[in-house]
Image (cartoon, coloured by chain):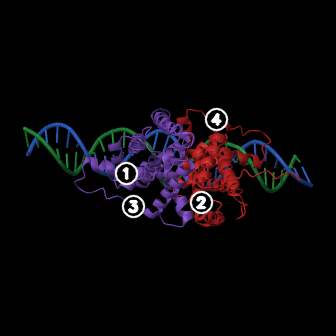
Chain colours: A red, B purple, C green, D blue
Amino acid sequence: MTADIANQENAGRAHIEHTILRAAEQVFAQYGYRGASLQAIADQAGLPKANILYYMGSKQTLYVRLLNRMMSRWNAVLEDITPESDPGRVLSDFIRTKMVLGQRYPDGSKLFAAEILAGAPFLSGYLAGELREWVASRAAIIGQWSRQGKMDDVDPRLLIFLIWSATQHYTEYSAQVTGILGKEMLDNDDIDAICRFLEHVILKGCGVQLSSEPRPLSP
Amino acid sequence: MTADIANQENAGRAHIEHTILRAAEQVFAQYGYRGASLQAIADQAGLPKANILYYMGSKQTLYVRLLNRMMSRWNAVLEDITPESDPGRVLSDFIRTKMVLGQRYPDGSKLFAAEILAGAPFLSGYLAGELREWVASRAAIIGQWSRQGKMDDVDPRLLIFLIWSATQHYTEYSAQVTGILGKEMLDNDDIDAICRFLEHVILKGCGVQLSSEPRPLSP
DNA sequence: CGCTATATTGACCGATTGGTCAAAACAATG
DNA sequence: CATTGTTTTGACCAATCGGTCAATATAGCG
């Protein structure tokens, strides 16, 4: 139905690829890997189907490329925390960052969700490898916070899962959320209210002292 | 690959339909509506494809039937709460019931998730109608608990979303959870630990007093 | 201009899609 | 036995699937 205007004449290679990736992300997000067709992607991009294959090689290559692009967008999250970090700040940032990422890349997030739902046929290696290591290292630091008495003694991995699920819900289940709340879509105020709710419940629930840290007195 | 043994000779109509529904639930859960093929469902059920259509009429009828069956399984949840109920008990039960339902019907849950992910083309009416009313009525009661001082003043609808997302995560993202935790699948002890974690964080986060209600003294 | 390299795309391929149909097998009743 | 109604299922249909290919158009450069 809605075809991108891909026929800007001076469209360089990078620009065309970007158009294709964006269209494919939408279609894959909605229908999953098997349910998506190259024809639907081509229509969405406003290009002939053979052109998609010329640039992307195959359906699988295109799909994997989208998965990798989405994964790279998550790199910044929780990256520079230390045993000395303030749990309140870190968890609060974690919640807001995840929430914003979901709003910024809804199709990429849904694409990822559909892949996991299907049993992660293309991502099982990543999940049991890099991501597992990442979670283990973050969990180790959070565990130290607990032992320092900065927060309750909860399983850090379950805490990470909780923040993931609670935030992703609003992108992947957006159809359900908007249907129930009776809104066409969530605006910035809604997102902010959700973030404040999640901060309240999760931080308080983990026994994190809200570091409304006393402003250093000017000397 | 794994074909159900559908050729028990005395298979009555109900039994055959059950076999088909179970097979279809698996395939739809994994590939979504468009990605699932009747041939794959037939193979899974161990029946010829034409037989599936003889009993179910069409792919869409079969799919809608599965959606309705899954929805009916959720009927008991949060059904009999009142303004006088104990929030701690109710929320705790809510968490555990949702968790158990996800473990009992993983394919149905995934099927539902895939439907929402695709934009809920078959469920938009239900979401904006019955389910919305259901949430509104439950939220009204939870709101009264807040006004009675039994818990913090949080948006009850967001609290419901939080419990939904946090519990569903372990069925719909089971591939990710097991990959990260390094387990083949979650056992009963895992589920119990998750429930206790969620109870701890969510109840405490909402300011619900744990009703370790003093046992009434025997007269 | 001519020559080469890259893009574009309609036509086509075998395989698979959801669905139909009629012939056959079976069950129940007389 | 014959007759009726219900299941079963292979064969088949038009449409679509992912992918190939060759003919063509365009661009860059001498």
Residue tagged by mark 3?
B2
Q: Position of residue B57 (x, y in %)?
A: 36, 40
Rendered position, B37 above or below B130:
below
Q: Label 3, label 4: how many angstroms apart (C-alpha)? A: 41 Å
Q: Chain of mark 2?
A: A
Mark before the other along the chain sequence, 1 or 3: 3
Residues marked 3 and 4, same chain = no
Dot 2, how many residues are within 10 Å of its Cα: few (below 14), some (14-19), or many (20+)? some
Q: Label 1, label 4: how many angstroms apart (C-alpha)? A: 67 Å
Q: Chain of mark 1?
A: B
Relative to A170, B130 lies left or right = left
Residue tagged by mark 2?
A152
Q: Position of residue A34 (x, y in %)?
A: 53, 51
Residues marked 3 and 2, same chain = no
Q: Label 1 sits on what residue type?
A: Pro
Relative to B132, C5 lies left or right = right
Pointers 4 and 2 in contact (C-beta within 8 Å) = no
Mark before the other along the chain sequence, 4 or 2: 4
Q: Label 4 sits on what residue type?
A: Thr
Pointers 3 and 4 in contact (C-beta within 8 Å) = no
In the rendered structure, find residue A2 and report the number of the disc placed on it.
4
In the rendered structure, find residue B216 and report the number of the disc placed on it.
1
Q: Label 3 sits on what residue type?
A: Thr
Q: Chain of mark 4?
A: A
Relative to D14, D25 lies left or right = right
Residue in front for this viewpoint, A5 or A95? A95
Dot 4, how many residues are within 10 Å of its Cα: few (below 14), some (14-19), or many (20+)? few
Q: Position of residue A118 (x, y in %)?
A: 51, 54
Element type at mark 3: loop
Q: Label 1, label 3: how many angstroms apart (C-alpha)? A: 55 Å
Element type at mark 1: loop
